[in-house]
Image (spheres, rainbow, N blue to C red):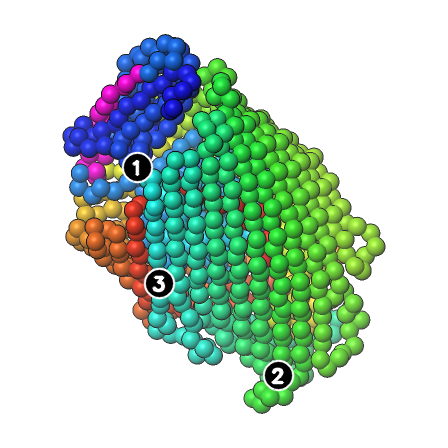
Amino acid sequence: MLFAQGGSIKGLVFDQQTKRPIAYASVSVLKAADSTVVAGSLTKASGAFAFSGLTPGNYVLRVAFLGYHTKMTGTLNLTGNGQIEAGTILLSLSETALDQVQVTGRHADALNKIDKQTYRADQFESARGGTAIDVLKNLPSVTINGEGEISMRGSAGFLVLVNGKPVLTDAQTVLSQLPANSLQNIELITAPSAKYDPDGKAGIINITTKKGADDGFTMTANAQAGLPSTGDHGNQEQPKRFGGDLTLNYRKGKWDLSAGGNYLRADVAGYREGDVYTLNFLNNTITRFPSNGERSFDKYNYAGRFSASYKADARNTFSAGLFLGHRFQSRLADILYTNSTADLTTQAVQKSITYFNSNLQTKEGGFSLGSLDYTHTFANKSTLTASALYEHANLYGNSKNRNLQYPNTADTIQYVLNPYKNPINGYRLRLDYATAIGTGKLESGYQFRYDTQDGQFDYFVTPAVSQPDAARFRGSARAKNQINSFYTQYSGRESKLEYTAGLRYEYAARTVNLSYDPTPHQLKLSNLFPSANLLYTFKEGWQAKAGYSRRVQRTTNFELNPIPEREHSETLEQGDPDLLPEFVDLAELGLVRTFSKGSFFSTLYYQNIQNPIQRVNSVYADTILNRVFTNADRARSFGLEAGTNLQPASWWSLYLGGNIYNYKINGSLNILGVTSYVSNANWVYSINVNTNFRLGPAWNLQGNVNYLSRRPTAQGEDSRFLVPNASLRKSFMNGRFAATLQWQNIDLGMKRSNRQRITTWGNDFYTTTNYIYETDVVMLNLSFNLNKLRGKMKLPASEFGDKEF
């Protein structure tokens, strides 16, 4: 029997004007005396809601839905095991949303809350058929440069959550495996509270994926294919671009099952132009080696996902998730070098050579992840949640460098092979408890994290050469990370003020064992991570907020690995096993304004960074640069981000976001035992624009532009980066089927889009490289939906493996 124990309240929620049911409206049961929330639920497709197991007392119902006025019922007196029929509750459209709901039927594209900004993923038509990265790059404080590096408020370090589960891995890798079509919302948490992991110096990006919302069976399917760009830079082969994804969901009774799969082939054609010189003061020479040639990528990934949720009863819920995936990437750089060595004083050329370097770098990985969660709700509505996650990642690859005679490329001067295997195992255990205290909620928890990586690296040179330090180019690097953490935080609301304050304690131990070093490289840290957030509504439509959070940017095993890899002819890459993590203080002040035609927000922020990790260059040999990771002393950043969503007309919507900040880095750099001083500062800004024109009941035209200005680095600067896109969408069958034609990386022969120059310099070197990628790419995306997909598909997310890819 549904209402076997305790009292119950049930009813319906309908639209006052149309008299139709409202699905997914939020219904809360509040104590009449102090407005404490004792239960909450969403209405079904029929508009129905029901609460059971309630203790006797006086209650009121609060009913809310986006675009409608929130409604409070009168006092409901519940006695014993009685049942109360609340009847039909009618919601009226709010004035601010009336025009949008009646004319366009669109949901809000962006929302601002106490600690985050939330953006609806499907508002960005140009991302359809792509990945989560294609959605993210449109957000106001997010940028992506020519190398695909994602930054949030100018920082490449941030924590990724998928449906609230942490992904302590390289964001670019994990987000490239999430199809854009499976995303529901993107949340930017810029001043995270203590209940979140402190990882990520810029904050947190939470990805919410879709699942079924109605009882029964739901499905969505997408397919895409693309034509070659108008200019392929004379690459050896045409890039391949095609893919598809499928998501299925079944909900019935106590079960909620979701399954999905995707395949994406997304090759990138490209070209690079480079210029380098090194100075040898001992020999009084300057060596120049300008270069140009192909730089293209073959990329594909495929994955299967499954999740299950079982609600045994009102107080016990179990959920499990499984992810199996594979990712492949090969980068071909066929570069022609013209080397010359001259006298530094007279500039007289002493020797010169022209040769061809064919470099193929391959990365590959299989990922297996599983998660299990259990939540128990006590009689007083407090909750206890236990979670476990396990991951295995089998990572491997190689770099092949062939230096060939030119123009007779059949003759090999030297062949260098760097193969490696780098498997990872890791798990996470977590226990969280939440209970109501006073008018707020107290949350506390414990978490244990553990991961190991066993890297095996080799180095072969043909023909063999005399290299005194050759032994350090091969061997093993085994890393182990172990973290214990505790947190507690309290959140609540007093009249117009909403607040959260908490503290997290963490003990972390890291060990790196190297085959050629008998002494382990160990680091043990004990730290506190406080946080606080305030949101004050001082006038209807006006809110002010403030936040503070202490964060940590942990080192990856790639950054810790000191065994050099010959990335290509002119570069060696290696890490530092004694690299320190970055510690960051984040502070922000913001203002939020909502009005009848949209919303606007602006936020002033400040970041103080201790031990900023830098990737810097030094000279290894006259024609080879070392690229190494090291710590600087300190960096700081302060800036302003702002965004607005406007509906100037029923047929036109506009989203505009921007970020401007000043970044400064200074202090000593230890580059392979040589100390140098760096001091670099400059202003950086980015602009993201997305505009949509509703041409008819089934036609939409959209354009968007992503622009990143030039920005300083520890030893130089990166140039500006521009990417414009456009799309035309036609829907059929009452919206169940849609076709989207996309025009990506628009350039029209102007040679300004999708290209970026990276420049660094030091006392004894200068290097600049212009990376030029495809422009004017045309894609076609087809999508089909059987019923609607909403909400969260609770899948496990990579904790450890992706960051080493």
Q: Position of residue 369 (x, y in %)?
A: 56, 49
Q: Position of residue 61 (x, y in %)?
A: 32, 19
- The residue pinned by badge 2 equals 404
Mark before the other along the chain sequence, 1 or 3: 3
Q: Secondary structure at mark 3?
A: strand
Mark before the other along the chain sequence, 3 or 2: 3
Kindly identify the residue that appears in the image at 39 percent across and 35 percent down. 253
> On the rendered structure, is 318 left or right of 556?
left
Kindly identify the residue that appears in the image at 63 percent across and 44 percent down. 427
Q: Is residue 88 magenta?
A: yes
In front of the other: 379 or 757? 379
- Do callouts 1 and 3 mark residues in contact (Cβ within 8 Å)? no
Mark before the other along the chain sequence, 2 or 1: 2
Residue 127 in view (yes/no): no
Cα–Cα gap, marks 2 and 1: 59 Å
- The residue pinned by badge 1 equals 599
Which quadrant of the figure has residue 473? bottom right
Tell me the kind of residue under disc 3: Gln
> On the rendered structure, is 718 left or right of 552?
left
Cα–Cα gap, marks 3 and 2: 39 Å
Q: In the displayed structure, would residue 231 be above or below residue 260?
A: below
- Do callouts 2 and 1 mark residues in contact (Cβ within 8 Å)? no
Mark 1 or 3: the one toward you:
3
Cα–Cα gap, marks 1 and 3: 34 Å
Which region shows up in magenta?
84-101
